[in-house]
Amino acid sequence: MAGGRRRGGGGRRGGPRHQPGTREPTPLPSALSPAAAVAQQNAGAAPKTGRPKKPVEQPEVRGPDVDSLGFQAMDRNVPGLSHVILQKLNMKSYEDYKSAMDGRKSSSDFGIRTYFDMFQKMEDTFKFCAECKKLPDALPDPKSLRRCKRCQNVYYCGVACQRANWPLHKKFCKKLKLVALDRLVEWLIFTGDIPFPTETWTKPARDVEGWEDWFSMQGQLEEKLDTILAGRYMTLLWANAGKPRPEDGELRESIRRLVTDFHSRPLTIGLGLRLFGIDPLAKVLTVHVVGASHVETLNTRLTDYDELTRMFPGHWGMEVVMVGVDVVDGAIMRPPLATPAPRGRVYLSSYKGLYHDFWESHVETKLAARPDLVVGFHPGFHACPDLLAGWLPTLLLLRDYRLPVLFTVYSEQELKSSLQILVELETHIMGYAANPFASLRPEQVYSSPNKAPVYCSSYYIALLGPAASAVPGAEELEDDDGWQGGEPSATGAAGGIAPELG
């Protein structure tokens, strides 16, 4: 929804993810672990905003509840699974879950007393037969579920189900092993071990074509990875995870994938600035992240987007404002700046509410700066009519105010569906392509794992204003290959992916 959450306007961080089109809720947020507070240690102090001391009253917001839809989708795949998740988290209802995602519960509220308890509860939420979908309580012996030895990810209630499922599972078993490993190692993001310290880019942003180039600029990379491998929390992880510690080579690759996952959003913002020709070295910039949710904001540190400073050394200052109804109270829950962002710094702020409400109450009244770029990570308006209806006021605002917009999606299927809608809304689609800074971390459909994993921000769509056909008196542009030189037709938009921005 406009200002909703992932798959309905959100982003990420927390644990196992979800199914394209319908967001499945996080079964156990690692951010609520006993070590979560470590993630806040390096948070800096906020500079003065130049705003009135009396806060602006934010309107009550309503919209489609995407997590609720996710619970429904989960139970359609595995009946009763949502109840297991709530039970393991010491919750009585979905409202308790929502309070947790809003940051209003501590780890003690979940009955988590030890590291082993935390990891065991998380693993328990994955215990259902991948073939017959039965949960442990539905089996004669609840302990009869056995995990696939290869991937250490999916479970079976017996040999018959495992054999019946193998023709399908073997297509994804290798990838699901990576998913299971990354799911555990992700905890080190919340302890502060990941990401490792990075350095100012030694190449201009335009010459960094993807993650291979980015890693090549990280000095003493192997030493940094060794430090994480030998760290206290890596040791605690494998002493309590209930699984044998993998080889160091596997852990190194997992850390690298999670580092790309962490930095994917700021680097995608940087990509958007470059695609639209917006120069951070020429003026102070403001970026709005529309549809931000707990996925972007739960335990977010004030320094989490500092890679933009390393990408654009010497920039004049940049503010990134998270706007969404599910923004979590935390370090970045501070009002947007009414004055320019501090020079050479990335300043994070947030607004809990719908984007079109934020525009009226803050941007139009000059309590917040007009954005130079608007970014939506996995807006999800394609998923269902309710989500599209929630997003519609924001999509029309972005179009009619001619704001540079960059949306990301998980897959080519989502790309096609989203383009179809944007074409019907007569939006000027400047281009769409694979994102060179997509996360390299594979993510499974939680309640239906035997599907191809997806990757966050796999593709981008660049938008700017209304289509030429929607502007009275505008000359008709030449239609080339579906988007270059003009507006893509609905058929062209759904039929192919352009190689770059036009």
Image (cartoon, helix red, strand yellow):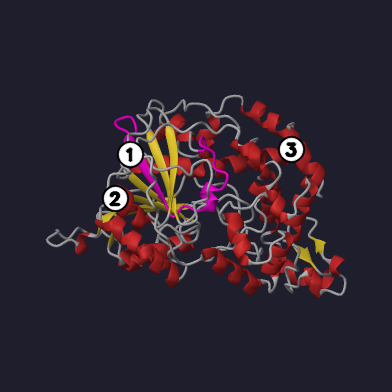
Q: Quadrant of residue 368?
A: top left
Mark 3 Cα-neighbour bin, 10 Å: few <14, some 14–19, many ≥20 = many
| Residue position marked by numbered label 1 in the rendering | 338
Under circle 3, the secondary element is helix
Q: Quadrant of residue 397?
A: bottom left
Q: Amino acid at mark 2?
A: Leu
Q: Amino acid at mark 1?
A: Ala
| Image point (42%, 60%), residue name | 60
Mark 1 Cα-neighbour bin, 10 Å: few <14, some 14–19, many ≥20 = some
| Image point (37%, 33%), residue name | 341
Under circle 1, the secondary element is loop
| Residue position marked by numbered label 2 in the rendering | 403
The x and y percentages for residue 143 are: 86, 65
Q: Are marks 3 and 2 in contact (CB under 8 Å)?
A: no
Of circles 2 and 1, the one toward us is: 1
Q: Amino acid at mark 3?
A: Met
Extreme residue in the front direction:
54
Between 445 and 139, the residue placed more toward the observer is 139
Q: Which residues are magenta?
A: 279-304
Q: Earlier in the sequence, mark 3 or mark 2?
A: 3
Residue 199 colored in magenta in the image? no
Gap between marks 3 and 1, in whole Å?
A: 42 Å
Residue 428 visible in the shown view: no
Between 252 and 124, the residue placed more toward the observer is 124
